[in-house]
Image: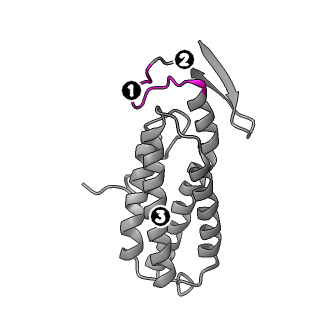
Amino acid sequence: MKQSFSDGRGSVNNITEPVPGGAPPGSTAVDDATAAYILETRRPFEDLRQVAGQLAGLLVLAAAGSKNAGPHHPLLDAAGLLYREAIDGIHQARVTNRARRHHHHLLQAAATLGAALAAAKRSPQIDPVLTPLRSAYDQLLQASQELPGFAMVAFEQGCCGRKA
């Protein structure tokens, strides 16, 4: 059976339900409780993505030699606020059995983004920020593959992408 629901931003998504005993990772089939979890965590997921993007942008400025790309850049304050809001949303989510792996990846992404933010506030050096940022991006990518509704843009060629 198909079920439609709104994500609160005007878009409607179709989710298949019910799923006795859960569904394999990456499956689009979810139960009602997991659909609610998806709605609860979509915003924090997007916020974490935005924080990662802001940090990546700051790293681009630093790599280009900008003197403004240091620990006192206003972008870091904005990213820190958004990060705290995302953390609150993640911790308040009602995690279903089907969503456990997704939630684990969100928590890991949040932890490593926190480390990247802290490093950016300490120093304008690139590597101490980039290493946890790459890890956070990887965790967000893994989370996006666990449940429907969490799309990621591929940045394999960007600063946060994996190098072969």
Which residue appears farthest toward the left when viewing the image?
A: 164
Q: Could you tell me residue 39's position as x and y percent?
A: 64, 38
Q: Residue 24: which numbered mark, if any?
A: 1
Which residue appears farthest toward the top when viewing the image?
A: 1
Inspect this view and state whether residue 60 appears. Answer: no
Q: Could you tell me residue 148's position as x and y percent?
A: 52, 32
* Residue picked out by circle 2: 18
Seen at 49% across and 46% down, the residue is: 153
Amino acid carrying mark 2 in the image: Pro
Mark before the other along the chain sequence, 2 or 3: 2
Q: Which quarter of the rendered picture does the C terminus lie within?
A: bottom left
Amino acid carrying mark 3 in the image: Leu
Q: Could you tell me residue 162's position as x and y percent?
A: 32, 55
Is 102 located above or below residue 114 in the figure? above
Mark before the other along the chain sequence, 1 or 2: 2
Q: Residue 113: which numbered mark, if any?
A: 3
Is 141 located above or below residue 76 in the figure? above
Q: Which quarter of the rendered picture does the N terminus lie within?
A: top right
Alpha carbon of mark 2 to alpha carbon of mark 3: how far? 34 Å
Seen at 42% across and 72% down, the residue is: 129
| Label 2 vs label 3, nearer the camera | 2
Magenta part of the chain: 21-32
Is 78 located above or below residue 161 in the figure? below
Q: Are marks 2 and 3 in contact (CB under 8 Å)?
A: no
Q: Residues within 10 Å of mark 2 (few under 14, many from 20)?
A: some
| Left or right of residue 13, residue 162 in this image | left
Q: Residue 151: which numbered mark, if any?
A: none
Q: Is residue 124 magenta?
A: no
Alpha carbon of mark 3 to alpha carbon of mark 1: how far? 28 Å
Which residue appears farthest toward the bottom when viewing the image?
A: 67
Colouring used for the render = one colour
Q: Is residue 26 magenta?
A: yes
